[in-house]
Amino acid sequence: MTYDVAFLTDPAAFLEIAGDLLAADPLVSTVMASVTSRMVGEPPPEDRPQWWAVVRDEHRAIAGLAMRTARTPPHPMFVLPMAAEAALALARAVHARGERVGGLNGSLPAAEVMAGELARLQGDTVEVAQHTRLFELGELVEPAAVPGRLRAATLDDFDLAKHWVDRFMHDADEQAGRDPSPSAGAHGREEIEPQDLSRRIERGTYWFWLDEEGERVHLTGANPPSYGVARIGPVYTPPEQRRKGYASAAVAAVSRIFLEQGARVCLYTDQANPTSNGVYVALGYRPVVDQVNLSIVSAHP
């Protein structure tokens, strides 16, 4: 089997080609679908790679999809499931473009195959940065009642929302026993840009849980539905407010919003953090597929 790889820089053109395939499995494709949809109409960046790849087999059928849109160095790729031969062809096509790839996230085993081939071509090695798990909400299980209420974030909340979103990945690494420093190979860590955060707040995709005094004690975000699937995240409670039930209450409330719209609801968890996994399972989320974040690091630092 031979494969052809086409690279596109226009997200709308990519969705025109790949939309039917993304819609066929909207849960597994949730990251690619939501990220690409959000970028339609945005000006292309000048300081980083941004592209989408379509792998076709010898019959011109789509055999694989990938993207490189991450804003934060080393701008990891994201890949959906594909056959090993297609993953190898894509890795070789990326290498032929003259790009060095320092990280790769996505579905197993395609992500491991592609990262291994890129590392071989670049003279690098592959390290596992994070094992993740995609969950879908079945029937929502209401958590224990918690004093307070959910409120949509507004632009007046920008500073706190920005601080907590930035803290989210740092604290997640710390809780999972990983080095939380920015230099520790956190290839999947995305610091949200102020303009992007403002747009998301204006679209109503962030919520605070307010305690009885009206103080903001928790933040839950979500990506609006793409092909009928909404994705919860980030979910952040500052250390001094943890173990009070705020995360369960907020995630349940936000999940209910999307369920009432007729959407399916999903979220990602860090497999190394049993606390957060337990919270979501208790709410009725069930595992769907395991994925991985891989770092491709120089063998000769």
Image (cartoon, rainbow, N blue to C red):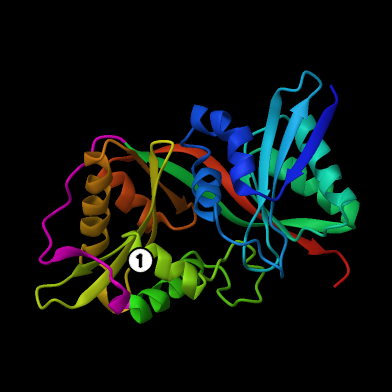
23 above or below 185? Answer: above
Left or right, 48 with respect to 143, comes to right
Instruction: Locate residue 39: give its quadrant.
Output: bottom right
* Front one among 292 and 53: 53
Circle 1 crowding by C-alpha within 10 Å: few under 14, some 14–19, many from 20: many
Q: Which structural element holds mark 1? A: helix
Q: Is residue 107 visible?
A: no
Residue occupying the point 66% across, 38% down:
65
Q: Is residue 152 magenta?
A: yes
Is residue 50 positioned above or below 56 on the image? below
The chief SS type of the magenta part is: loop
As for residue 222 lying within the magenta part, the answer is no
Q: Position of residue 299 (x, y in %)?
A: 86, 64
Measuring 24% from the left and 73% from the top, which residue is drawn there?
217
In the image, residue 166 sits, relative to residue 269, either above or below, namely below
The residue singled out by tag 1 in the image is 201
In x, y percent, where is residue 68? Answer: 68, 53
Question: Magenta residues, as a range?
Answer: 138-157
Residue placed most toward the observer, 278 or 17: 17
| Quarter of the image that includes the N terminus | top right
Q: Is residue 5 left or right of residue 281?
A: right
The kind of residue on which mark 1 rests is Ile
Percent across and percent down for residue 66 are 67, 43
- 34 lies above or below 244: above
Would residue 301 appear left or right of 142 to someone viewing this image? right
Instruction: Name which residue lies at 23% across and 75% down.
Output: 216
Residue 76, given in percent of the width and then of the height, sits at 68, 58
